[in-house]
Amino acid sequence: MKTQYYAASSLDGFIATEDDSLDWLFMLGNVDESSYPAFIAEVGALAMGSATYEWMLRHADEVARETGSAWPYIQPVWIFSTRELQAIAGAESHFVRGDVRPVHAEMSKAAGPKNIWIVGGGDLAGQFYDAGLLDEIIVQVGSVTLGKGKPLFPRRLVAPPLTLVSVQQFGSGFAELRYQVPKSAP
Ligand SMILES: NC(=O)c1ccc[n+]([C@@H]2O[C@H](COP(=O)([O-])OP(=O)(O)OC[C@H]3O[C@@H](n4cnc5c(N)ncnc54)[C@H](OP(=O)(O)O)[C@@H]3O)[C@@H](O)[C@H]2O)c1
């Protein structure tokens, strides 16, 4: 079982624009022709921050059109927020806040032998990293720059550096980089 931060980023390191738009992402390629189907098949539990969750709420119609359901995950999800958020029908959702370590323990139990996906945002992935709980970072680097926006991973991770495990091209829109997080980090 691994804890993986899997996300798409612009070439200049942003996972969304400042106003949480992902329009730039969807025009770069078809998700079915990416690593996503194989990746999600091995995921047993998901974690996301409230901005990511609220994006799903705001785009429920679009998500339903694309995937057949307003909530496309069969796995349980842990949503981090200090606020009360509306639940999505059909989702096994756990609303949590604060320290990621006890949440990770709960998620591990639920995931069993499968992986834990930190969906985003970047700081939430950073919180798992800070706690020594992040094993892999998998980034689809899109062929666009955004100038500014929500950061991919707002941490200084220098020594030891990440270990680059693989590089794969998906069409002309994405280069996927897979990194192992060193055991001694942070
Ligand atoms: N390109 C991609 O692959 C990709 C992947 C994921 C997300 N995204 C997009 O990127 C953007 C991410 O937004 P974001 O960077 O703002 O991150 P986010 O993690 O989705 O949301 C951040 C918010 O989550 C809550 N939170 C985070 N950690 C918490 C903790 N430990 N305890 C309690 N609450 C906590 C806080 O808000 P409150 O307490 O106010 O609720 C915080 O402001 C979204 O637009 C999303 O749709 C893109």
Image (tube, rainbow, N blue to C red):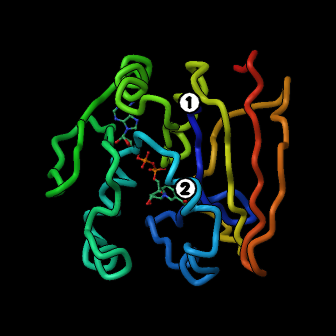
Residue at (64, 80) in percent of width and height: 28
Horizontal arrangement in the rendering, residue 72 relative to residue 8 (left or right)? left
Question: Can you tell which mark lies on residue 150?
Answer: 2
Q: How many neighbours does mark 1 have within 10 angstroms: few (below 14), some (14-19), or many (20 or more)?
A: some
Q: Is residue 60 above or below residue 105?
A: below
Tell me the crowding category of disc 2: few under 14, some 14 to 19, or many 20 or more residues within 10 angstroms, Cα based: many
Q: Which residue sits at x=28%, y=62%?
A: 71
The answer to which image quadrant residue 132 occupies is top right
Q: Is residue 98 above or below residue 123?
A: above
**Residue 96's disc number:** none
Task: State the image quarter where residue 134 is shown.
Answer: top right
Q: Mark 2 belongs to which amino acid?
A: Lys
Q: Which mark is residue 1?
A: 1
- Three-letter residue code for mark 1: Met
Residue 85 x, y percent position in the rendering? 18, 47
Counting from the top left corner in percent of width and height, residue 143 is at 74, 75
Residue 83 vs residue 95, the one in the foreground: 95
Q: Position of residue 153 (x, y in %)?
A: 63, 43
Residue depth check, mark 1 versus mark 2: number of the one nearer the observer: 1
* Residue 142 percent coordinates (x, y): 70, 70
Circles 1 and 2: CB atoms closer than 8 Å: no
Residue at disc 1, secondary structure = loop
Is label 2's Cβ within 8 Å of ligand 1?
A: yes
Label 2 residue SS: strand
Q: Pick whichever of labels 1 and 2 is earlier in the sequence.
A: 1
Q: Is residue 6 left or right of residue 74?
A: right
Residue drawn at x 32%, y 38% as measured from the top left: 78
What separation in Å lies between label 1 and label 2 (alpha carbons)? Answer: 28 Å
What residue do we see at 36% from left, 74% from top? Answer: 67
